[in-house]
């Protein structure tokens, strides 16, 4: 019987003992449990097996022809790993299309099961007996035992196809409630949640309301007397923000480090009013993997990687897991996440120990089994397929000091469902993009992949666009762009969306260019080594914004507008999302903040009519957001090499005069 079926029986027995309702089990922890229960409760006779697809035969022929094959299948099922090392799904041999399915005839699986259950042949038994008799006569023949083979853990069929053929099907993404239930069942007193964000569409991959859902310690405020931690029900859970793929932002690490104040401000805007007065000193980039690995080792306890799909959790897991430190001393060791029911006893008088053991039993029921601790264990599979991880992957380190858990990703959106299968890989930004400047004159629009359209709504203004996306951009007239996007016009421009997507095109909203980047974009006028002019003294302003495409990248839009004579410019204009052109607006803003604190509502954004704006059209009007500009184009420009190559050109100074002198001498 398969491992998943045994887990089902164990789950039913423990739920009867612990009085745990079976409906509370998160379905994503073992996707095959529910279907196996349906197969067991069906009206099919229990004698029929699904180990092979051969036609049924008589009892005599089955007994005489297939005893060895049947026994080999049973032995292979018993020696399979408890869960797939690549996706974390529990091993099973029943549901072929589900994660965790193993084909027992596959080469790697056969080698692993054969090494896990070695069998001695008749010749080996005779040779072993002869060597034992010879050793009794006083001869030293040495050790003739078979060398042990250490094979790599085989992955399931789904992970095998993802790794070698780059084909696979995503799992059903779990809900936030399932992630919450899993973390709440942790037996560790100290837990740390690593909220993984993607730099490609930062901060669209943020899970809203994660602090309230997981009851984590509130963010430390700017008050120097604020507390550093808080316990909830005898447990302390903290959170850190990890930005993966940060090398997509700038070519150098020093440039990304200089962006940290900007990233902190953008994250504060995304968190909303609750993050107005917090420090946000717990933000790190994926370039700091060495420091993050040391923090995980020193902190110990339970470390949980939480985030949406395709944000780089599995790759981060491979980089920050403390490998080779099983026997290294350092810090207090915590109890492991496993219970030996044969040797463990519950003292009647020790109530605390009984409660701890009960909590561990409940955790074993709902979480996959913990593999044995190794110095260099098999790491989760890294793939561009959304939803590669099917179940939590648990790996302990430090001989029980702590554990790192890779959780399945939450739903991020289904933009790839509107794209042709052969072009879905083009949605993933694999390397830093150096875009070309797109000029959007009046009557022009910017098309991305033929199915995302950005159209300026402000007349008589020229905009500049920089597409930091792997999707090919193209500038054309608005009429042609509408026909290409709605798939009603034959064009040489490739539309990578599925047929029929043009009927689903809708407006995703109008986004104004409301952030002032005059100082960054004005060049030598405001440079310290040149003009040294203040941006408030210039007769123009440069406004910009970044349009985010979920999971793909962003488009930087810039426009230069004339400064109004009655405008009162203030230094903090670029810091405000609300219009601040006059003192009346600033006073109204303070009143809105006071009403927001009292009533608990959202601040209504005031859009200035002087801001240039663009309207974005996408499938179903989704997958788009806006943020304050990063000015990534300033980092992406090509470096001009002024160094001359080869021999310099000969100077032509005085050549005409010398030629005239030669002519005169000849005459």
Image: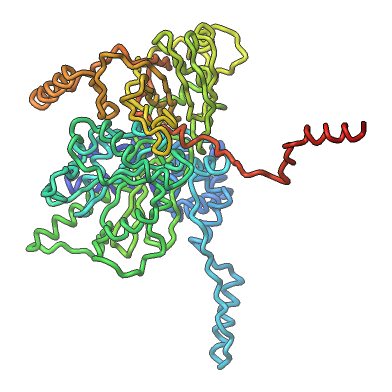
Q: In terms of depth relative to the viewer, which is nearer, 391 or 412?
A: 412
Furthest residue in direction bottom, as rendered: 138
Q: In terms of depth relative to the viewer, which is nearer, 283 or 541?
A: 541
Give x and y (percent) for residue 285: 37, 45
558 to the left or right of 216 = right
Q: Residue at x 40, y 24 (%)?
A: 547
Give x and y (percent) for residue 45: 40, 36
Residue 64 seen: yes
Residue 1 seen: no
The correct choice, above or below, for 273 with respect to 149 in the image is above
What kind of colouring is applied to the model shown?
rainbow
Q: Residue at x 42, y 47 (%)?
A: 254
Give the quadrant of the C terminus. Answer: top right
Furthest residue in direction right, as rendered: 667
Q: In terms of depth relative to the viewer, which is nearer, 380 or 430?
A: 430
Give x and y (percent) for residue 393: 37, 48
Q: In terms of depth relative to the viewer, which is nearer, 497 or 94?
A: 497
182 to the left or right of 83 = left
Q: Residue at x 45, y 40 (%)?
A: 250
535 to the left or right of 376 = left
């Amino acid at each position: 019987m398969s491992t998943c079926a045994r887990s089902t029986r164990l789950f039913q027995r423990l739920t009867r003992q612990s009085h745990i309702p079976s409906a509370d089990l998160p379905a994503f922890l073992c996707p095959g449990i529910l279907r196996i229960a349906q197969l067991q409760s069906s009206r099919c006779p229990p004698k029929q097996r699904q180990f092979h697809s051969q036609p049924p035969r008589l009892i005599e022929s089955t007994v005489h022809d297939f005893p060895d094959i049947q026994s080999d299948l049973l032995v292979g099922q018993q020696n399979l790993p408890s869960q797939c090392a690549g996706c974390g799904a529990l091993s099973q041999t029943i549901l072929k299309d589900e994660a965790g399915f193993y084909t027992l005839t596959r080469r790697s699986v056969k080698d692993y099961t054969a090494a896990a259950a070695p069998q001695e042949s008749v010749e080996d038994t005779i040779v072993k007996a002869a060597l034992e008799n010879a050793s009794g006569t006083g001869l030293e023949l040495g050790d003739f035992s078979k060398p042990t083979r250490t094979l790599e853990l085989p992955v399931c069929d789904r992970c095998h196809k993802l790794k070698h053929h780059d084909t696979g099907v995503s799992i059903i993404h779990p809900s936030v409630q399932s992630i919450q239930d899993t973390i709440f069942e942790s037996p560790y007193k100290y837990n740390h949640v690593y909220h993984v964000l993607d730099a490609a569409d930062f901060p669209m991959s943020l899970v809203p309301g994660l602090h309230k859902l997981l009851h984590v310690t509130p963010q430390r405020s700017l008050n120097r007397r604020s507390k550093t931690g808080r316990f909830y029900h005898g447990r302390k859970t903290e959170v850190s923000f990890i930005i993966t793929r940060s090398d997509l932002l700038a070519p150098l690490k020093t440039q990304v480090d200089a962006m940290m104040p900007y990233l902190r401000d953008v994250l504060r805007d995304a968190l909303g009013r609750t993050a107005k007065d917090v420090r946000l000193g717990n933000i790190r980039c994926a370039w700091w993997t060495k420091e993050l690995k040391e923090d995980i080792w020193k902190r110990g306890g339970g470390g949980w990687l939480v985030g949406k799909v395709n944000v780089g959790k599995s790759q981060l897991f491979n980089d920050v897991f403390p490998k080779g430190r099983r026997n290294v001393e350092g810090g207090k060791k915590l109890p492991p996440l496993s219970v030996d029911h044969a040797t463990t006893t519950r003292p009647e008088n020790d109530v605390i120990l009984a409660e701890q053991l009960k909590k561990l039993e409940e955790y074993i029921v709902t979480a996959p089994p913990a593999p044995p601790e190794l110095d260099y264990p098999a790491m989760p599979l890294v793939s561009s397929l959304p939803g590669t991880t099917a179940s939590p992957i648990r790996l302990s380190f430090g001989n029980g000091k702590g554990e790192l858990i890779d959780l399945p990703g939450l739903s991020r959106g289904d933009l790839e469902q509107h794209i042709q299968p052969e072009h879905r890989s083009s949605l993933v930004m694999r390397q830093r993009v150096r875009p070309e400047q797109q000029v959007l004159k009046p009557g022009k629009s910017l098309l991305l992949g033929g199915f995302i359209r950005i159209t300026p709504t402000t007349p008589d203004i020229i905009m500049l666009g920089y597409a930091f996306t792997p999707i090919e951009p193209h500038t054309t007239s608005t009429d042609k762009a509408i026909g290409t996007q709605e798939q009603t016009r034959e064009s040489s421009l490739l539309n990578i969306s599925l047929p029929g997507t043009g009927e689903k095109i809708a407006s995703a909203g109008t986004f104004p260019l409301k952030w002032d980047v005059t100082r960054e974009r004005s060049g030598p006028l405001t440079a310290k080594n040149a003009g040294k002019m203040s941006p408030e003294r210039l007769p123009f302003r440069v406004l910009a914004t970044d349009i985010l495409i979920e999971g793909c990248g962003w488009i930087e839009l810039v426009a230069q507008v004339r400064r109004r004579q009655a405008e009162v410019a203030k230094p903090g204009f670029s810091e405000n999302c609300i219009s601040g052109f006059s003192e009346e607006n600033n006073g109204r803003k303070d009143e809105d903040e006071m009403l927001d604190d009292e009533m608990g509502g959202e601040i209504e954004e005031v859009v200035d009519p002087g801001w240039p704006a663009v309207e974005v059209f996408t499938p179903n009007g989704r997958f788009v957001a806006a943020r304050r500009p990063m000015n990534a184009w300033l980092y992406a420009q090509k470096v001009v090499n002024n160094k001359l190559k080869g021999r310099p050109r000969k100077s032509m100074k005085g050549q005409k005069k010398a030629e005239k002198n030669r002519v005169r001498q000849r005459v």
